[in-house]
């Protein structure tokens, strides 16, 4: 098996045993990138030279006996994380030439653990989208079927892992932007509890929802990455000072005697029959592992989408006010006065979906409409969170499909924003409630497209999430299949 | 109609955006569709429900008010479209 096709833990064993080197591994990954990137286009910026320098440092560290959690492991970063000295575009023209003067906390932590950074992956502009079609730098294709989207907004990270253009990747998830593309690309994707991972240096989209998490080839690798990135950060006031357990320790514990909830509202009209069959089979596997599966109700589920598309754009309209052409980012040369410069810079710098959400959010927050939209949405959000709190009083975990359909065709939903928004319908509740969720491959359609199952647990119960995800993965064994490229 | 053309133009100004005729037309129609969908929320009784402001219940996160190293000037200006000396230069603000 080629080095680029292996997992973090498999590669660590080989690096430790001296069977390969970080340099050989990094070169193998870049060789793979050169072979498939013209088809997939997972990256906005490749960082081969700095990666080889990092690999060299990793090899010296290994020789010195200093093998850390990620020493020599090639990891891709969604282009939403600030990387000191390397441009960070957010998939937007407005940040096309932005070179951050500092590293995001997650980037610092990965680097301190010995990681090698392959590059910055493609994404929907400012993480607003479900298909990676709104990037200013062109779209990413699904490695399983190049006529289809990889999901979004972290589509580049998901596709890069699926196509073996890196060993693992980081993404951000505001309404499903890790789990949805993970499901559609047949990899593992985890959104941690709100506050579990520091967002310092993550370009903000919707601050009450955004969270950073890993894309990996299996569940164990997700635990390895979470061990590195989780934890309190004094520079990030919403990060939570809770202890970080060793997530790897949960992997083999199983779920015997658990109660697992099946929310009935997630198995309704619009769910693709092949997706439903794969997820029902997954529920069978969960029962076979000694868990009792019970139907539960999350009665406010049908309102999640409306709440999300008020709260997220409202927060985005405020967060994106900083792009004014003054301190950084694109400035239009045509502004004769300050107001004209603002308007022309923003109008030329942002794409259509970003403008649509800024408009929606500005409207929802504007005088006379605040109560009807933002306040109402925040009240219903409290009810949605309450539904989950109630469910987790009796359930150890919940199981649902990650997406209502497999990957759709490129261009299929670009003209109908509401249809596009519906592809996140099964993932956004996790963000609204602030709980953790993971998507794990659970089968393939007749056409060979991956299907993902989503597990959710209570706040800070990532340990339980790893128990059920690892137990399922071991017995269902779908994470080994790779796309033919 | 949930939102009129005139309102779209007003909101665009608030958001410091500008659109041509065709874009304004398209945004008005798309925002209408989206806002009509939002009407679903009116079915939910929320009279005694406190709005949720944070996913994790926390009090304010205070830190000590201590002087620390900040971004050096040249780095703070490095990404500026039009830096001059120690300043960000902008088009004329006042007549």
Image (tube, grey):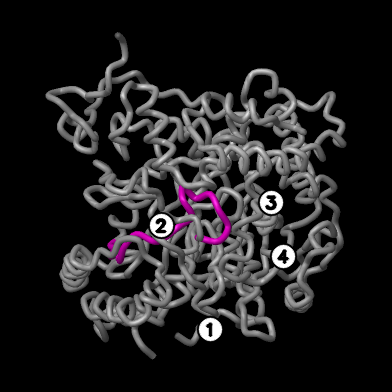
x%, y% of residue A365? 62, 26
Q: Residue furthest bottom?
A: A1
Label 3 in the same subunit as label 1: yes
Residue drawn at the location 24% of the way across and 35% of the way down: B81
Q: Chain of mark 3?
A: A
Q: Is residue A124 magenta?
A: yes
Of the two numbered discs 1 and 4 in the rendering, the one whose residue sits closer to the viewer: 4
**Separation (CA) of disc 2 from disc 4:** 24 Å
**Separation (CA) of disc 2 from disc 1:** 23 Å
Residue drawn at the location 83% of the way across and 57% of the way down: A265
Q: Residues within 10 Å of mark 1 (few under 14, many from 20)?
A: few
Instruction: Judge whether A428 appears above or below A478 on screen.
Output: above
Q: Chain of mark 4?
A: A
Horizontal side of A282 relative to B74 (left or right) equals right
Q: Chain of mark 1?
A: A
- The disc placed on residue A404 is 4
x%, y% of residue A249? 52, 65
Decide which of B85, A340 is in the foreground and name it: A340
């Amino acid at each position: 098996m080629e080095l680029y096709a292996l997992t973090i833990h498999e590669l660590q064993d080989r690096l430790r045993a001296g069977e390969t080197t970080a340099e050989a591994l990094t070169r193998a990954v870049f060789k793979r990138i050169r072979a498939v990137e013209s088809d997939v286009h997972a990256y906005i910026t490749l960082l081969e030279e700095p990666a080889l320098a990092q690999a060299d440092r990793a090899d010296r560290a290994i020789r010195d006996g200093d093998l850390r959690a990620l020493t020599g492991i090639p990891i891709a970063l969604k282009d939403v994380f600030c990387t000191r000295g390397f441009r960070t575009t957010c998939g937007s023209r407005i940040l096309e030439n932005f070179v951050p003067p500092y590293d995001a906390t997650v980037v610092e932590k990965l680097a301190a653990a010995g990681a090698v950074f392959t590059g910055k992956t493609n994404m929907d502009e400012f993480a607003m989208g479900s298909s990676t079609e709104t990037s200013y730098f062109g779209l990413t294709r699904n490695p399983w079927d190049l006529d289809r989207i990889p999901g979004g907004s972290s589509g580049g990270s998901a596709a890069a892992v699926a196509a073996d253009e890196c060993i693992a990747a980081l993404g951000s998830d505001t309404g499903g932007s890790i789990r949805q593309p993970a499901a559609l690309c047949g990899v593992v994707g985890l959104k941690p509890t709100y506050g579990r991972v520091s967002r310092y240096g993550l370009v903000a989209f919707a601050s009450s929802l955004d969270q950073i998490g890993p894309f990996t080839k299996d569940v164990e690798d997700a635990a390895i990455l979470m061990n590195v990135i989780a934890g309190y950060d004094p520079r990030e006031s919403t990060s939570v000072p809770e202890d970080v357990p060793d997530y790897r320790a949960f992997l083999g514990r199983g779920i015997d005697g658990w109660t697992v909830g099946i929310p009935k509202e997630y198995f309704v009209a619009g769910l693709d029959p092949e997706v439903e069959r794969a997820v029902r089979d997954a529920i069978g596997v969960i029962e076979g592992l000694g868990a009792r599966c019970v139907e539960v109700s999350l009665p406010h589920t049908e309102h999640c989408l409306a709440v999300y598309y008020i709260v997220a754009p409202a927060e985005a309209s405020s967060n994106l006010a900083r792009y004014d052409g003054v301190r950084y980012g694109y400035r239009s040369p045509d502004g004769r006065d300050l107001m004209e410069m603002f308007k022309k810079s923003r109008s030329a710098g942002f794409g259509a979906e970003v403008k649509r959400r800024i408009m929606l959010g500005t409207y929802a927050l504007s005088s006379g409409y605040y109560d009807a939209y933002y306040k109402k949405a925040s009240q219903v959000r409290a009810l949605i969170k309450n539904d989950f709190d109630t469910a987790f009083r009796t359930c150890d975990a919940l199981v649902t499909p990650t997406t209502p359909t497999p990957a759709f065709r490129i261009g299929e939903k670009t003209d109908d924003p509401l249809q596009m928004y519906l592809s996140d319908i099964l993932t956004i509740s996790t963000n609204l409630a602030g709980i953790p969720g993971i998507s794990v491959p659970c089968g393939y359609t007749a056409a060979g497209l991956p299907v993902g199952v989503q597990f959710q647990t209570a706040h800070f119960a990532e340990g339980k999430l790893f128990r059920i995800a690892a137990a399922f993965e071991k017995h269902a064994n779908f994470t080994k299949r790779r796309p033919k490229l | 109609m949930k939102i009129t053309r005139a309102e779209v133009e007003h909101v665009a100004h608030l958001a410091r955006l500008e659109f041509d005729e065709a874009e304004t037309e398209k945004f008005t129609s798309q925002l209408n569709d989206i806002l009509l969908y939002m009407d679903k929320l009116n079915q939910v009784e929320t009279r005694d429900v406190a709005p949720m402001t944070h996913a994790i219940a926390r009090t304010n996160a205070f830190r000590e008010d201590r002087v620390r190293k900040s971004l050096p000037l040249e780095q703070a200006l490095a990404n500026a479209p039009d830096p001059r000396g120690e300043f960000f230069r902008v088009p004329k603000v006042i007549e």
